Amino acid sequence: MDSAEFHAAVYHVVRQIPPLKVTSYGHIAALIGMPKHSRHVGQALKFLSPDTTPPVPWYRVVSSSGAISSRGPGTEGAQRQKD
């Protein structure tokens, strides 16, 4: 699976996460058949364009400890963590 296919697979799975539910980077990696690539899932979401349509709810993907990875202080991601 090349990088573009990997990113597309990640985005497809993340779009399936229902509102008010979350899953982990590792779970996403396992679902796309790449169970040892949870960090790559994070990278795919990190470089996600805000203009991507349909939108990818990246904030529904959490670390194995249950925390949402921030995109930095003062960003939309930081605000969504508080909500």
Image: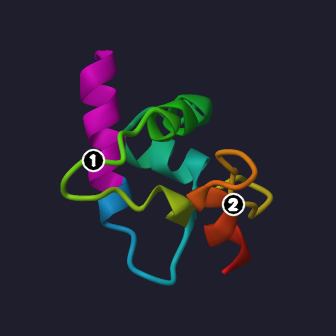
Q: Dot 2: what SS?
A: helix
Name the colouring of the figure. rainbow
Q: Are marks 2 and 1 in contact (CB under 8 Å)?
A: no
Q: Residue 45: percent from the left, percent from the top?
A: 47, 41
Q: In this figure, what is the number of numbered marks?
A: 2
For this orientation, the residue located farthest to the right is 65
- Which residue is at a point 31% across and 66% down the rendered structure image? 16
- Which residue is at a point 51% across and 78% down the rendered structure image? 21
Task: Name the main secondary structure of what is drawn in magenta.
Answer: helix
Which quarter shows the C terminus? bottom right
For the magenta stretch, what is the residue range?
A: 2-13
Q: Dot 1: what SS?
A: loop
Which quarter shows the N terminus? top left
Left or right of 28 on screen, residue 50:
left
Q: Nearer the viewer, residue 13 or 69?
A: 69
Q: Quick one: label 2 or label 1, which is nearer the N terminus?
A: 1
**Would you name the residue on which mark 1 appears?**
51
Q: Which picture quadrant has residue 61?
A: bottom right
Mark on residue 80?
none
Q: Residue 40: percent from the left, percent from the top?
A: 53, 28
